[in-house]
Image (spheres, rainbow, N blue to C red):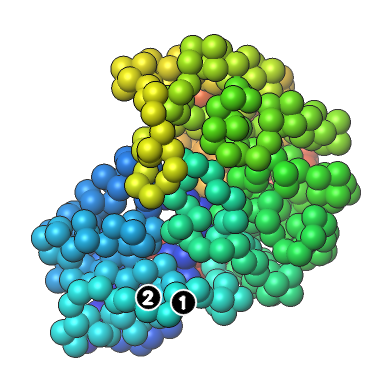
């Protein structure tokens, strides 16, 4: 009898990629079938996140939800690294295993079915080799996430990630090319290069640029996108590689965190406000039509109103198209957890609200610059805003098409030329252009991944 296994993923794109690796491994075994979390699985694997206190709470929520629907509940991910005792206390949890054992998920499921209960110990400090496995499809997206790097050597005072993910390590360029090629063969025309710290990819400052140039030669890949990349990863070599390729997506998500040098120094971010701004200017000079996203934190210990004002000034100057605003929460084992001069929760809440409002306003103004522009869009999924479809342009505009503004029948994975007609608060409305205006290309084979996700 085939046993049904479901997965639920929390957190970053790197974690989402890890789940795809585990799904592939389980799906290769004849006695298992991967099913949606919303179905009736026999076993659920929860891939947790622990980057914030909110992520911990959300992880616990979905672990409890899994315990109500499955016979076996298995938990992995970053929350298991330092807080496995908290997870063990949750009723219904059967097995806990660390990030380093994700490639052995089939073995762990079989052990659980044979009666093993408890924690799989990482006794040898095992760090998995990210060249070991690759994916050929992504069951949850029309864009495929491709993890090329893991771990982090930075020591930001607020962050647990370097404890949770281990030292920085990179996938070889040959292995990345192989993986990207397989994804292209299966119809994924857009790949998103992801990692914990993409700025640390490979050996030497030019490694990521070389990879971009090599991937640009793959015939079946039409879009290459970067996920978040720290400021020191923005180099002339990288931007020249972007400029020289028609396949690269001109959107750069570059975390700022704070616009105050005093707070950046306390965070141990390793750059100043001026350095960050020079990197943004470098992008603008090299890449026409580029857009910028960022991460921002409010309420870090010692943050005064003048520091917050500096962050708002920086946001205005950058001209963001999107931004993620977080309230600081102390993370155990991090230096900042012991810092004094804590910011009151009500102040953090007010600053976060003000900053989100500012980011939203600036984003809308930035997106208005693209009104009446013709852009390339890949259809992703039904719109959650209107009766129609949604997808993203190369520069990461969130575009929505009404049925009456479509040319022909559209499906996820199809590429279509559109003209932006209206800019809303948090998305753009557009009209598709007819085929005789270079309108319509189909990324064939994309449905293979979608069909797998519906099993």
Are the residues flagged by discs 2 and 1 in contact, CB closer than 8 Å?
yes
Q: Quadrant of residue 292?
A: top right
Q: Quadrant of residue 323?
A: top right
Taking depth in this image into account, of 242 and 201 the one nearest to the observer is 201
Residue 222: x and y in percent read 73, 55
Between the residue at mark 2 and the residue at mark 1, the CA separation in whole angstroms equals 6 Å
- Tag on residue 116? none
Q: Is residue 186 visible?
A: yes
Residue 155: x and y in percent read 55, 49
Question: Residue shown at 48%/21% (left/top)?
Answer: 303
Q: Quadrant of residue 46?
A: bottom left
Location of the C terminus by quadrant is bottom left
Location of the N terminus by quadrant is bottom left
- Tag on residue 126? 1
Q: Is residue 272 left or right of residue 343?
A: right
Q: Is residue 364 visible?
A: no
Residue underneath mark 2: 122
Residue 60: x and y in percent read 23, 51
In the rendered view, tell whether residue 133 sits above or below residue 261: below
Q: Is residue 189 left or right of residue 387?
A: right
């Amino acid at each position: 009898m085939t046993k049904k296994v479901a997965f639920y993923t929390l957190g970053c794109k790197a974690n989402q990629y890890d789940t795809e690796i585990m799904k592939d491994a389980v799906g290769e075994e004849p006695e298992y079938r991967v099913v949606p979390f919303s179905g009736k699985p026999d076993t659920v694997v929860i891939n947790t996140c622990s980057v914030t206190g909110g992520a911990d709470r959300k992880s616990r929520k979905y672990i409890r939800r899994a315990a109500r629907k499955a016979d076996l509940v298995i938990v992995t991910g970053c929350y298991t690294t330092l807080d496995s005792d908290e997870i063990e206390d949750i009723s219904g949890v059967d097995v806990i295993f660390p990030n380093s054992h994700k490639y052995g998920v089939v073995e762990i499921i079989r052990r659980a079915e044979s009666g093993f209960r408890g924690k799989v110990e990482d006794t040898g400090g095992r760090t998995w080799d990210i060249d070991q496995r690759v994916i050929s499809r992504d069951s949850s997206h029309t864009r495929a996430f491709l993890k090329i790097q893991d771990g982090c050597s930075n020591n930001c005072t607020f962050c647990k990630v370097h404890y949770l993910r281990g030292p920085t390590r990179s996938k070889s360029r040959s292995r990345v090319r192989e993986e990207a090629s397989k994804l292209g063969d299966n119809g994924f025309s857009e790949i998103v290069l992801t990692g914990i710290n993409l700025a640390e990819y490979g050996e030497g400052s030019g490694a990521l640029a070389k990879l971009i140039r090599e991937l640009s030669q793959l015939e079946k890949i039409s879009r290459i996108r970067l996920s978040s990349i720290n400021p020191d990863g923005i180099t002339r070599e990288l931007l020249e590689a972007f400029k020289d390729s028609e396949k690269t997506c001109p959107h750069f998500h570059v975390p700022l965190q704070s616009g105050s040098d005093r707070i950046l120094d306390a965070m141990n971010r390793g750059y100043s406000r001026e350095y960050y701004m020079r990197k943004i200017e470098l992008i603008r000079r090299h890449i026409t039509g580029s857009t910028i996203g960022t991460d921002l934190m409010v309420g870090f210990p010692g943050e005064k109103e003048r520091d917050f004002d500096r962050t708002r000034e920086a946001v205005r100057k950058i001209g963001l198209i999107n931004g993620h605003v977080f309230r600081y929460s102390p993370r155990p084992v991090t230096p900042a957890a012991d810092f004094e001069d804590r910011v009151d929760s009500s102040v953090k809440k007010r600053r976060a609200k003000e900053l989100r409002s500012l980011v939203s306003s600036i984003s809308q103004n930035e997106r208005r610059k693209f009104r009446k522009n013709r852009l390339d869009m890949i259809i992703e999924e039904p719109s959650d805003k209107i009766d129609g479809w949604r997808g993203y342009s190369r520069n990461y505009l969130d575009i929505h098409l009404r049925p009456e503004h479509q040319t022909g029948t559209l499906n996820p994975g199809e590429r279509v030329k559109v003209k932006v007609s209206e800019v809303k608060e948090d998305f753009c409305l557009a009209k598709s252009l007819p085929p005789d205006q270079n309108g319509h290309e189909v990324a064939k084979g994309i449905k293979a991944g979608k069909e797998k996700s519906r099993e």
